[in-house]
Image (spheres, rainbow, N blue to C red):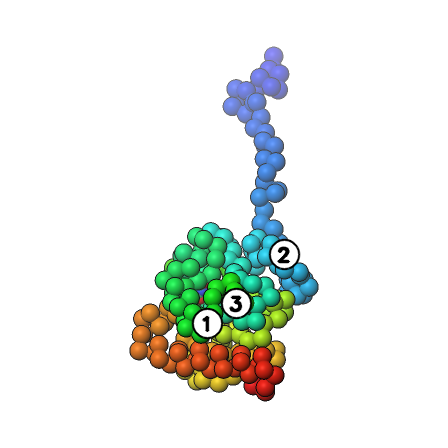
Amino acid sequence: MSLPVQERLRELGLWPRWRLRARPAQAASAAPAVSEGPAEIARMDWEALRRAVLTCTRCALHRSRTQGVFGVGDPRAEWLIVGEAPGAEEDRQGEPFVGQAGRLLDAMLAAIGLKRGDNVYIANVLKSRPPGNRDPSPEEVAACLPYLERQIDLIGPKLILAVGRFAAQSLLTTDTAIGRLRGRVHRYRGIPLIVTYHPAYLLRNPADKARAWEDLVLARRTMAAILAGRPV
Ligand code: URA
């Protein structure tokens, strides 16, 4: 007499049959959000832009960062300082230039009568920290630049100070060495832009602080001319 099917399956170890468990409810919502593209970023208001940066997944850096670093200061500032990318301390605190290089940047600003947050906005080209503070890749710069471009549109600064090679080369779309970019007034979409050394570089090469001081004097003189309506 043949055994019922279930009994035969049980003897073969095939009953009860293995069943797929229900997919955990959170799986769908844990999927990374798709970040907006450049055309949408270019239409965002300040708050939407800030939220987009904090939740951005446009490049792989979102996987290793602690948080996106949007920028700090007065969103109507006449001065815009642009750096490279958050370092370890900026990644932890969510604010640009708060480490050792940031303290030197604050001293550089103070030397020309400026103060973080007071008619000054500080932002970076990259909003997420490259692991180990490595150089940003061209793909990361391309993915992140629309955020900075929109920040510049919305702030409408009178003058941009690009600190370091990455900020200068990214905004001026050039690969000219920083030594040849400093010392004159460039334009970013019509806005006067001055290039100087990155404070982290100056910490390693203090002999170049004299050149950085010349750049800051040029920036101060250029702003005075802009405010007086003189050509720059
Ligand atoms: N270096 C930068 O370029 N930006 C920061 O925010 C910190 C260090």
Asked if disc 1 is less than 8 Å from ligand 1, the answer is no
Q: CA distance from mark 2 to mark 3?
A: 19 Å
Residue located 51% across and 56% down the image: 68
Above-or-below relation of 167 to 32? below
Examine the rendered structure and indicate whether residue 135 appears above or below residue 208. Answer: above
- Of all residues, the one furthest to the top in this rendering is 1
**Crowdedness near tag 1: few (<14), some (14–19) or many (≥20) residues, C-alpha within 10 Å:** few
Estimate how packed mark 3 is, as few (under 14), some (14 to 19) or many (20 or more) residues with alpha carbons within 10 Å.
many
- Name the residue tied to disc 2: 47
Left or right: where 124 falls relative to 190? left
Query: Residue 230's spot in the image, x, y percent?
Result: 59, 86
Secondary structure at badge 2 equals: helix
- The amino acid at mark 1 is Gly
Which residue carries the number 3 mark? Answer: 120
Q: Earlier in the sequence, mark 3 or mark 1?
A: 1
Whether tag 1 and tag 2 are in contact, CB under 8 A, the answer is no
Q: Decide: is 142 above or below 7.
A: below
Q: Quadrant of residue 88?
A: bottom left
Most foreground residue, 129 or 161: 161
Picture coordinates of residue 195 (x, y %)? 47, 78
Where is residue 213 shown, x and y percent of the image? 39, 78
Task: Look at the numbered disc 3 and give the secondary structure of its residue.
Answer: strand
Indicate the quadrant of ligand 1 in the picture.
Answer: bottom left
Q: Are marks 2 and 3 in contact (CB under 8 Å)?
A: no
Amino acid under disc 2: Glu
Q: From mark 1 to mark 2, how far is it between C-alphas?
A: 29 Å
Mark 1 or mark 2, whichever is nearer to me: 1
C-alpha separation, residue under disc 3 versus residue under disc 1: 11 Å
Q: Residue at x 39, y 63 (%)?
A: 103
Q: What x and y, as percent, mark residue 119?
A: 54, 67
